[in-house]
Image: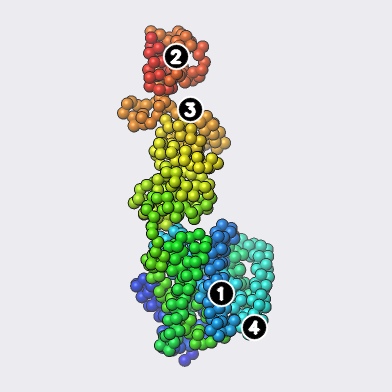
Amino acid sequence: MEHNLLYVIFILLSLGAALVALCVRFGAPPILGYLAAGLVAGPHLLGWLPDSPETRFLAEVGVVLLMFTIGLEFSLPKLLAAKRLVLGLGGAQIAVTTALFAAIAWWMGLTPGAAFVIGAALAMSSTAIALKQLGEQMELGASHGQAAVGILLAQDMAAAPLLAIIPALAGAESGLALALALPMLKAAALFVVMMTLGEKLLHPLLHWVVGARSLEMFMLAALLIVASMAAMAHALDLSPALGAFLAGMVLGESEFRHQMEADIRPFRDLMLGLFFATIGMQLDPRALWLLPHWVAAILVGLLLLKSGVIAALARAFGLGANAAWRAGVSLSGAGEFGLLLLSLGMGLGLLPRQPAQALLTAMVLSMALAPFLVRYNGVIAARLAPEREPAPGSDDAVSAVGETFSDHVIICGYGRIGQNLAILLRNAGIDSLALDLDIGRVRQAADAGEEVVFGDAANSGVLAAAGLERARAVAVTFDDPEQAIRVARHARFLRQDLSVLLRCRNARHIDELRATGAEVFPEGLETSLTYAAQLLALIDVPTDAIETLVNDIRAEEYAPLLAFFHAGDDDAESGRHDLHRRSVVLKEGDFAVGRTPRQVGIAHPDAELEHIMRGGIRVPGRKTDTFLKAGDILVLKGKGDGLDAIERRLRG
């Protein structure tokens, strides 16, 4: 029977749709559905599809598009910002795991090239499975989740050079070092050429296409770029997928990145599904009963050794034992790129058939187990690393988390303001650790991956355990002046150079909070300033003028805003302020009429004359030689007793 491309696509899509639907229904990864479709339709079961050039072409197109989108997501600034986890932990994981499994394969009699392929393939984990499951469990923000993300990013990056190295290993067993170096030099030269083309040709071309305002033209241009760069890599005897990855890197920092990714994603997802189906076609189910001991040994060895290596490295990079094992268990299975590398090695004849089938079967089984390993990573880690949990809120409990932080902000109080502050700090790329005494809130936030622990921030031991010596600043967000003062004094005692910001809701506490040496954020006064600034902007007051007005108020330490008029004793805010304003209207017969403020003698230690209103004109209160008239409005500012005393003198 002739198996043309349309027939291949029809068979794989029909079976794939049905089996992927079953996987989704039972919570299994869709990848397993595509693998099963290839297994069923492949030469080892129903025999509907042989291993043909058509199927290999579909697989290669899917990989090319995948690597291009990974290249688009590659950002050098973001990589450098996360270099400790990605380049450090992730790079170490790839190197150590590859070396370990390659050494075992070589010890068992395989050639160095075959051993390298096996080591690299088994070092990879499933990005699609791990990230999806950790995200659903809200663990991406936890320490083990962050470590897992860093390792997966490093693996994605490593896939590109591995795609260049493995083809060069075929037929180069006598000169392995040269076989590894030559493709890397070619890839570096290709990257330089692509960077030049990107700057001189691709960016202007895309600008011209965008100017035509045609989404069809833009999509065609994106596909043309991918195909051209893949063909250029192929011409250099490199993997076409490597060329696509480098093209994505060149365009990843451009303004076209997101639109190109959106245009290519539908093609990529379809072709990737077909790629995994072609991997399934290579699976020989007879390996399960012909080589069961090898499949079981590889599966168990992969899960145990890989999780152990990741856990050990994570511990070396500062994670606690439990978090390290959780990261290791979550990434212990094989991954998509591992299947790709193994398939590539099989196609190039680097791997003998029987070991390759045992490896492929064990890797697919590990991917089937991966969702459950990620789901129960906490339970498994608790058995692998049993440890006595310190009492919640104790110095040891806080220190267990705080010791992993440096150059961070300690947030005291994790209410609405504390949570919003943590979000803004995270968006700014600044680590934070929050302390809170609401155990329910702490548990919910910690389960959601937030960096928050139960502890009393007003306790100097807890502050020290939170990494005060290594902190960048302390922010007190709760509304409790006494506790805030204690936090500030402890923090300043332990570190004189530390920046401390205190929240002040009631203006009466500003002075005593400032006396601690901390910066004070007067919440109500700043709200007034922000509200006024927004109103001034709405009525077209120039921005420079608004900034000047606001900065002048701040320069005066909010003095013009510290007093206000009260509606009466029932005013909810009257108890929050010591300073009041009061307007006194002079009447005929009042003692002050016909006299100056100096003659009246209105000076008082607890109150003062702020200004005089006469016919709509404001006269500053410091002009004490102004003769007062009936109808004048004297605006007084001060404490209640002082205001009463001045008003009595004015009335006589």
Q: Closer to the N terminus: mark 2 or mark 3?
A: 3
| CA distance separating discs 4 and 2 | 101 Å
Marker disc for residue 165:
none
At horizontal 65% and vertical 84% (from top left) the residue drawn is 174
Mark 2–mark 1 Cα distance, whole angstroms, equals: 88 Å
What amino acid does circle 1 point to?
Ala
Instruction: For label 2, count other residues whose C-alpha is less than 10 Å away and answer few (under 14), some (14-19) or many (20+).
Output: many
- Whether residues under marks 4 and 2 lie with C-beta atoms below 8 angstroms apart, the answer is no
Q: Earlier in the sequence, mark 4 or mark 3?
A: 4
Determine which residue is flagged by label 2: 602
Q: Residue lying farthest left?
A: 570
Image quarter hosting the C terminus? top left
Q: Which mark is residue 99?
A: 1
- In the picture of the structure, the residue carrying the numbered disc 3 is 560
Identify which amino acid the numbered label 2 is placed on: Ile
What colour scheme governs how the chains and residues are painted in the rendered image of this protein?
A: rainbow
Which mark lies nearer to you, 2 or 3?
A: 2
Residue beneath the point at 56% across and 63% down: 88
Asked whether the viewer can see residue 323, the reply is yes
35 w.r.t. 440: above or below = below
Asked which secondary structure carries label 3, the reply is: helix
The amino acid sitting under disc 4 is Ala
Mark 4 or mark 2: which comes first in sequence?
4
Report how far apart the C-alphas of labels 4 and 1 lie in the structure. Answer: 19 Å
In percent of width and height, residue 132 lies at 43, 66
Question: Residue at 48% across / 54% down in the picture?
Answer: 403
Q: Which mark is residue 172?
A: 4
- At label 4, counting other C-alpha atoms closer than 10 Å, the crowd grade (few under 14, some 14-19, many 20 or more) is some
- Is residue 226 shown to the viewer in this render? no
Looking at the image, residue 645 lies above or below residue 68:
above
